[in-house]
Image: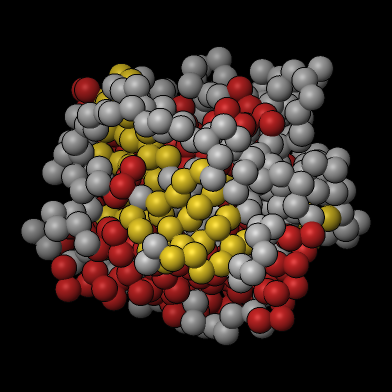
Amino acid sequence: MKLQVFELLLQQSTKKAPKLASLVALTIVLSVTIIFAYSPSSLWYNPRKISQAPPSSTSLEESIRKDEEFKAAKSPETEPKGPSSSIKNEFNNTTNSSKLADEEKSCDLFTGEWVQIPEAPYYTNATCYGIEDHQNCMKYGRPDTGFLKWRWKPDGCELPIFDPHQFLGLVRGKSIAFVGDSVARNHMLSLMCLLSRVVYPLDVSTTNVENKHWVYKDYNFNISLFWAPYLVRSERTDLNDVTRPFNLYLDEFDKNWTSKIEGYDYIIISAGQWFFRPTIFYENGTLIGCLACKQENVTQLTMHFSYEKAFRTAFRAINSLTNFKGVTFLRTIVPSHFEGGVWDQGGDCVRKRPLMRNETVLADYNSEFRRIQLEELRIAREQGRDRGLRFRLFDATQAMLLRPDGHPSKYGHWPNEKVTNDCVHWCLPGPIDTWNDFLQELIKREEINESSFT
């Protein structure tokens, strides 16, 4: 059973990229505004709608510095082996341009709107012990709870609410790997909290803090997180200062994850915020340029340049795995929602309800990120088709674009702490829990596909 609308979305990825002048201008903005080494993407205030502006190129948010830092020296570890334009127009044009052959078998899960659901949330910070402080909005006094009481409603069908019993049945004897940055970890923790209504996992992680592993023994089900913010090989230019630029080897595999995922049944791969920070680019071991660096006589390249190269290399790594038989889900870029300034200049996210589709548009630079992802997914599918490898779209962009109310803001730390507002990550519980509604349905479809060929 083919999910036809995913193919249509990928076909749209061949749309013409933004003009070179726009990319050059964006790079100049990034270069001029460097303060530190990392910037979550941010929004400028608009009294009518949220409309994202390019991020400043600055340091990691202090509130999540401890989560984003790489360790200078890696410890050896033994991995558990996995068993056997405007967003409105972009998405609506995709679905309206085609008639699905079989509505019951194939439905676009990712185009829709948020509708109220009074019985949510399905866990709290009192019932799930795994919530990290900077996403524990209730612990730090967020006064409103209305943002919790919404679910995603696709335009042409229903998306079932996550059912932990059903999900554990689907993944019995299987394994899931999350590959990416701290937003990937945010997603993984949401999944674990939803499953905590039934069972808690056993932490079987080793001393390597970059990767984490859990096992649900009663279900022979493993979850792993592989820290890979750039997806490709990277290294610090200064082992003692994480705010310094990173060297990025755009054509080399990041073996922190590529050497360990061959036995996994499902991989969820994503990347985003780290590509805004200053980086120095290498190909074939040779310096080819940089983003927002201060080196003379070095070609200034764009964040979109490195993003495209990184995804192509990451997918090439997966396609090169001789024994990999699993499913790879590409989770698309999700925007941050800073208003009133950039993250380190008073920007905040204080809204208390979802937006409607006509209230916001996806910023050009994020639209280009998404276009790149769709195009690289299309290429990966073509390259993996002969081996029967499956690459699937996990399109979180539209749903999360409409949720400026779902971030921690100042409720990820105590009031007296000098920490900037977080409008990048997501409160737990919160809108990110919907990603696991998506995941459950996507895995269910894969299981149906497999059973139809057996």
- Please say if 40 is above or below 68: below
Q: Nearer the viewer, residue 104 or 60?
A: 60
Q: Nearer the viewer, residue 206 or 453?
A: 206
Q: Position of residue 332 (x, y in %)?
A: 50, 58
Quadrant for the C terminus in the image: bottom left
- Tell which of 415 and 1 is nearer to you: 415
Colouring scheme applied when the structure was drawn? secondary structure
Q: Residue at x 59, y 80 (%)?
A: 17
Residue 81 vs residue 134: left or right? Answer: left
Q: Quadrant of residue 32?
A: bottom right
> Is 274 above or below relative to 87?
above
In the depicted structure, whether residue 115 falls above or below residue 224:
below
Most extreme residue toward the left is: 454
Q: Residue at x 46, y 32 (%)?
A: 72
Q: Quadrant of the N terminus?
A: bottom left
> Residue furthest toward the right?
47
- Compared to residue 222, the image places residue 316 above or below, namely below
Q: Position of residue 133 (x, y in %)?
A: 61, 22
Figure quadrant of residue 386: bottom left
Residue 317, given in percent of the width and then of the height, sits at 29, 59
Q: Position of residue 314 (x, y in %)?
A: 36, 59
The answer, for residue 164, to whether it is visible in the render is no
> What residue do we see at 70% from left, 74% from top?
24
As drawn, is 230 to the left or to the right of 211?
right
